[in-house]
Image (spheres, rainbow, N blue to C red):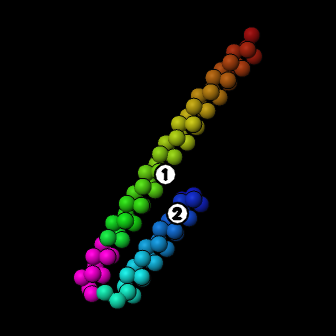
Amino acid sequence: MNNSGKVLFAALVGAAAGVIAGVLLAPASGEETRKSLEKEAKKLKKSLEDKIDDLKESGKEKLEEMRDSGKAKIEEMKDYASKATK
C-alpha cells in the first residue's frame, strides 16, 4: 500500500472511531443509537466506496500512461536499431 493509501485508510479508521465514540457516548436510547450507528456506517461505506473508485480510476489512468510510454520507447528503440544497422 502506498503512502496515500495508508493515509486514506488511517483517516477513514479515525473518522469511524470518532463517529462510533460520539454516538455511544451521546445520551440516546438503544434504538436511537443503533439507527444513528447504521446511518453513519452507511455514510462511511459510501465515502469509502467513492474513494476506492477514485483510486481505481487513477490507477487505470497511470497504467495507460505507462503503457503508452512503453510503446513509445519500444518504437524509439526500433528506430535507433534500424538506423544503427544501416
Q: Which residue lies furthest to the left in this view?
A: 31
- x, y percent for residue 85: 73, 14
Q: Residue furthest top?
A: 86
- x, y percent for residue 86: 74, 10
Q: Residue at x 32, y 70 (%)?
A: 39
Helix, strand or loop at disc 2?
helix
Q: Toward which corner of the image does residue 78 lie, by quadrant? A: top right
Q: Magenta residues?
A: 29-38
Q: Toward which corner of the image does residue 47 lie, by quadrant? A: bottom left
Q: In this view, does 70 lie above or below 41?
A: above
* Residue denoted by label 1: 55
* Residue denoted by label 2: 8
The amino acid at mark 2 is Leu
Considering depth in this image, is 60 or 53 the residue closer to the camera?
53
Would residue 36 be found to the left or right of residue 21 on screen? left
Q: In this view, does 86 lie above or below 58?
A: above
Would residue 60 be found to the left or right of residue 24 on screen? right
The amino acid at mark 1 is Leu
User: Disc 1 vs disc 2: Cβ atoms closer than 8 Å?
Assistant: yes
Considering depth in this image, is 62 or 33 the residue closer to the camera?
33
Considering depth in this image, is 78 or 39 the residue closer to the camera?
39
